[in-house]
Amino acid sequence: MQVEVSGLCKSFYRQTVLNKVSFTILSGSVVCLLGPNGSGKTTILKILSSIASIGSGKVSINGKEIFPGDPSSRKFSLYIGHNASLYPSLSALENLFFISGLYGLNASVDKIDEHLRFLSLDNHRDKQIKFYSQGMLQRLKLAVADLIPSPVLYLDEPLNALDQEGENLFNDLIIEWKKVNRTMLIATHNINWVLGIADRIITLKNGQIDLDLDLKVMSKEDAGNLITGSG
Amino acid sequence: MGNLIWKELINEWRSREMVVSMFIFGLAVTLVFAFAFNVSPVLFRQFAPGLLWVVILFTSVLGLNRLFSYEGDMDAHWSWISAPIDRGLVFLSKLLVGFIFLSMAELLFIVPFFLFLNLDVSFSILFFLGILILGNSAIISIGCLISGLALRANMREVLIPVLLFPLASPVIIAATKSTVFIFENKPFGEWRIWILILFTFLLTSALLGYLFYDQIVEE
């Protein structure tokens, strides 16, 4: 599904966070958002996933404008935030069961187990997640993204606290998700990782788009130089 | 909706923080009242309805704080805010679960309340239970509306009582008046108006919560 953002503006307490941000994410592509802290990456993801209201501008998925108050606007996308967005007193199994219910899936234990097993969490599935390490929480969030088959996926700092094995599993997941044409918008700080996985890179500076680089028409080396050069 | 209620019940079952703390608090306030007012049981009977609803209101603040504070742990509330569900259902599930937990705690401290304050039970239990159910649901409904507003506020623990007490005061007045009439075994027709006021507040706050929870929880 194609995501179109046009003229997006957002202010918090009279402070402009996003200023006329426009971009299009083609169906099945991986677009990465880069930028320093406070540049507006998380705000974009929150607006697109209807957690935050739209200040002004327009967001549409496959040509259909989304309105945060409309539940049907949220059925095509899944947001995985930098915090777990899961209930600490619930086990991994219970959390996934709850989330799958929110998306009308009501996944079976076997189905949930399958996703937990892929991320090596099946041995900890009945443990309350407040006892999980940061890395395990990050893997659990990826299990959520894998379980809920939303065609559009917004991921905020998915690499945080992941060890090398976790990062490899995540890369495998992205390849799998691309095969089923999932559209992904990923906010991260890891330039090297982005260069290896993204179809397109958008960098933000002070709430505005600084660079918009299509990696299908330019080399990764040039893109890397431009990004590090623009600092 | 069932999924949301199940999550609330599991959370409380694991921690047992809400019902236990509300019960202990209610019991402690009852004891304070029993020792602070050294008056005859006849006089106490006149005070009792007001004291009872003050205890219930104070106790409900503890429950409401807990009912919403764990949503902020790990930003758990984002899971349902970004999900394709009617957010009004989240409000209704909180209302239902908050009502159940407050009623459970109340059932535990209401017996000591009558014992410590030397109150006899010479009134209609059915009417009394009815007013407790109505009063509890109205307080929790207003409380859930406020707590939703305070979901992302830093001073949530302060904000909830500061907003709840004035907004819930008509409910407390109506519930107290009704309880006075029940204790005095007055016919229903004489205090029907207070029940209507309670109903109005319950319906208005529940409807507002259901309809506007979308805007309330959005950033």
Image: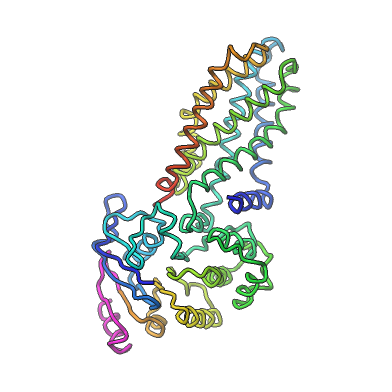
**Residue A94 belongs to magenta span:** no
Location of residue A212 with respect to B158 vertically, above or below: below
Of residues B27 and B190, the one drawn nearer to the viewer in this rendering: B190
- x, y percentage for residue B95? 56, 40
Q: Quadrant of the N terminus of chain A?
A: bottom left
Of residues B45 and A178, the one drawn nearer to the viewer in this rendering: A178
| Residue shown at 64% from the left, 76% from the top | A117
Q: Quadrant of residue A77?
A: bottom left
| Residue shown at 30% from the left, 66% from the top | A5
Location of residue B93 with respect to A195 vertically, above or below: above
* Apparent side of residue A111 relative to residue A207 in the rendered image (left or right): right
Q: Quadrant of residue B36?
A: top right
Q: Quadrant of the C terminus of chain A?
A: bottom left
- x, y percentage for residue A185? 39, 72
Location of residue B173 with respect to A137 vertically, above or below: above
**Residue A212 belongs to magenta span:** yes
Of residues A123 and A14, the one drawn nearer to the viewer in this rendering: A123
| Residue shown at 40% from the left, 85% from the top | A196
The number of callouts visible is: 0
- x, y percentage for residue B138? 55, 31
| Residue shown at 63% from the left, 58% from the top | A90
Identify the magenta region: A203-231
Location of residue B26 with respect to A94 vertically, above or below: above
